[in-house]
Image (cartoon, grey):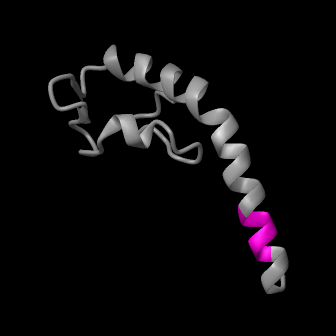
């Protein structure tokens, strides 16, 4: 892929992620809130130590225990 094609592909990926981000993030956070590894006070997963409000918005991210 040449540079303009790579830039265009990146822009498309960012737009696609933006469209999916909110509903997906809300669904993922609800799953997290019911999980024994979620620390509500810090909003962190005790298994991977990620800040879940941020991680849940990354469409390519995965739950470390396979819940989403």
Q: Which residue lies furthest to the bottom in this view?
A: 2
Task: Tell me which residue sits at (29%, 45%) in the image.
Answer: 50
Towards the viewer: 47 or 18: 18
Confirm whether the magenta stretch covers residue 8. Answer: yes
Q: In this view, does 6 lie to the left or right of 29?
A: right
Q: In which quarter of the image is residue 52?
A: top left
Give the main secondary structure of the magenta stretch. Answer: helix
Residue drawn at (75%, 73%) of the image: 7
Count of numbered circles on the image: 0
**Residue 63 position (above or below residue 27):** below
The region drawn magenta spans: 6-10
Quadrant of the rendering where the N terminus is positioned: bottom right
Decide: is 1 above or below 36: below
35 is higher (above) or lower (below) than 64? above
User: Does the magenta portion include 25?
Assistant: no
On screen, residue 50 above or below 26: below
């Amino acid at each position: 892929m040449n540079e303009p094609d790579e830039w265009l592909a990146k822009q498309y990926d960012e737009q696609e992620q933006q469209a999916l981000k909110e509903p997906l993030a809300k669904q993922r956070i609800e799953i997290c809130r019911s999980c024994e590894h979620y620390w509500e006070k810090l909003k962190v997963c005790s298994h991977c130590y990620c800040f879940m409000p941020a991680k849940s918005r990354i469409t390519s991210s995965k739950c470390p225990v396979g819940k989403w």
